[in-house]
Image (cartoon, rainbow, N blue to C red):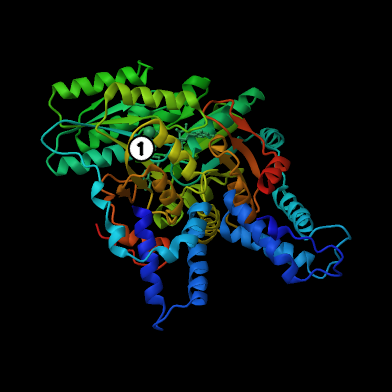
Amino acid sequence: FSSMFQSIAGNAVLEKSDLKPALKALKDRLMTKNVAEEIAEKLCESVAASLEGKKLGSFTRVSSTVQTAMEEALLRILTPKRSIDILRDVHVAKEQGRPYVVVFVGVNGVGKSTNLAKVAYWLLQHEVNVMLAACDTFRSGAVEQLRTHARRLQIPIFEKGYEKDPAIVAKEAIQEAKSNNSDVVLVDTAGRMQDNEPLMRALSKLINLNNPDLVLFVGEALVGNDAVDQLTKFNQKLADLSMILNARLIDGILLTKFDTIDDKVGAALSMVYVSGAPVMFVGCGQSYTDLKKLNVKSIVKTLLK
Amino acid sequence: MVLAQLGGSIARALQQMSNATIIDEKVLSECLNEISRALLQSDVQFKLVRDMQANIKRIVNLDDLAAGHNKRRIIQQGKTSVVMFVGLQGSGKTTTCTKYAYYHQKKGWKPALVCADTFRAGAFDQLKQNATKTKIPYYGSYMESDPVKIAVEGVETFKKENRDLIIVDTSGRHKQEAALFEEMRQVSEATKPDLIIFVMDSSIGQAAFDQAQAFKQSVAVGAVIITKMDGHAKGGGALSAVAATKSPVIFIGTGEHMEEFEVFDVKPFVSRLLGMGDWSGFMDK
Ligand SMILES: Nc1nc2c(ncn2[C@@H]2O[C@H](COP(=O)(O)OP(=O)(O)OP(=O)(O)O)[C@@H](O)[C@H]2O)c(=O)[nH]1
Ligand SMILES: Nc1nc2c(ncn2[C@@H]2O[C@H](COP(=O)(O)OP(=O)(O)OP(=O)(O)O)[C@@H](O)[C@H]2O)c(=O)[nH]1
Ligand SMILES: [Mg+2]
Ligand SMILES: [Mg+2]
């Protein structure tokens, strides 16, 4: 491994061939940390492009120059370009006399319902009135699961049982929230595979009909290369299957199961890279308090370690 | 075994790839790089790919590779079997428990389901609703919080009722939380399962190996089921984890419905992993 880090101090300008071994090593390291192959490759290409033709400072090794450039690139990618302040937006909505609506979407079993309950808990801590909407009307036990959280958190829940059209249930829930003075409605949806056209169409319908304030994509930190496909296709399908002109896409990401991956934190990078959406919350356990903000610096440090 | 099979398939792929009679060093290296990339894109653990690349030239004896495949631990009809399901959170245990029960019921077994997940909100309702739909007897409790106690009671109850396939569903867990692993060990010790099935999501990435290895070290995992194969993921991370459990994959899950469940067949799995596009096995139902 160390042979890849030869010193070429004194060389005049960096050429592609000088960079190649160090970039290869870096790409391998990113993939070991569970960054999707495609993303690791693209990152290395852009780092190469940014360095090619540059002068190497004396006594600097190629490997450390590459490392520094990569660190900058990672920080740039992971630092949100659009920032969303939920609490501020909730108050704006309240002043407009309407509830703030969040829809949780994602593939099966990633932690949508559990982390929806954690977000409810977090909002309660900030003295916001929350209501849950049980719009997973498909999976066995989904309604009871949400009901249990509502009971434990002592907050209202709107539910219509199973086999109802989730888009309609969500609409009725939002209406109900207006009359019971809830500030926020958290809408749970059924998990679905990004390739499942009928289910993606149903999700698009729910989102278009209710025009939520926030479409939150829930993805698990355990996921490998599929992270890229999940986010790409959720956005693509929401755009393509929509009946309206400016379809709503993913606004933010909730990254779950962060407590199960040790230093393999790469999914965070893959998800942000492909969607451009910020990681708004990180789920790091199975209780209500296990919800954090993403620490960009620590992710970058772990990725490059 | 699965990995060995994969090696075999790669060797075959190489043979097919070269129309020329001789594959020299250079051609081989190029092919291997291509294949490695395909594997990494499928989430196969990085180290495994490296090792495989190093070893591949030695893998030629295809007959050798098939050996060991019969070590598959199968439960036998005619006596009572207890099967315990374990795995990470949300991997598909509860759904797969019912699919597994339903599959065997259609083959003439008398399955029963025990819900030893006292942690997850709505877990018992989920199992109960699935069991009701498929008309399979179930056992569980809304009040009791000790999974060991429920598991033991459930198994006892169904043994008395002469059910011949008693399936125990457990909570999702991960290696970082020792107490959860200890709980799993206790359930296993108390119910003495004939088979422990590790359920894994096909989309899992590089963390798969370490997690699977930890499960294997804690309880006697004897078989693996890979779920959500109807998704887009190729299952390479899962495959790496299968290597860690040293157990065969016995079924795959291909959807949320009860009948979306297939006996594992290595060929289409590997084809898909290598992007060779033979999906037949996943599609015919
Ligand atoms: N360790 C850990 N487990 C989590 C986390 N978030 C959720 N889980 C667990 O993941 C499992 C699945 O969570 P759910 O909230 O039911 O997932 P879901 O996305 O709503 O699932 P479906 O609705 O069936 O698609 C549960 O066992 C949760 O306790 C987390 O941050 N860390
Ligand atoms: N598309 C698809 N979804 C599946 C498959 N198997 C399970 N699921 C879904 O995955 C989600 C999680 O499944 P569960 O059976 O609740 O997972 P679990 O391992 O019991 O979860 P915990 O008990 O919380 O650890 C549910 O939405 C299931 O419907 C499958 O093969 N394909
Ligand atoms: Mg859910
Ligand atoms: Mg379960």
**Residue farthest bottom in this picture:** B20
Percent x, y of residue A255: 58, 41
Q: Residue at x 78, y 55 (%)?
A: A64
Q: Is residue B190 visible?
A: yes
Depicted A63 relative to depicted B16: above or below = above
Name the element at disc 1.
helix
Say which residue appears at 27% left-offset and 38% top-offset: B98
Residue drawn at x 36%, y 39% as measured from the top left: B198
Horizontal side, residue A6 vs residue A217: left or right: right
Residue nearest the observer in this picture, A160 or B59? B59
Using the image, name the chain to which the residue with label 1 belongs. Answer: B
> Does residue A102 appear left or right of residue B158 in this picture?
right
**Few, some or many residues within 10 Å of mark 1 (<14, 14–19, 20+):** many
Can residue A241 be seen at all in this image of the molecule? no
Instruction: Give the image quarter of residue A45.
Output: bottom right
Q: According to the image, label 1 marks what residue?
A: B93
Ligand 2 within 8 A of label 1's CB? yes
Instruction: Give the position of the C terminus of chain A as an image quadrant.
Output: top right
Q: Quadrant of ligand 2?
A: top left
The amino acid at mark 1 is Lys
Q: Position of residue B161 (x, y in %)?
A: 13, 23
Percent x, y of residue A299: 67, 43
A300, above or below B185, in the image? below
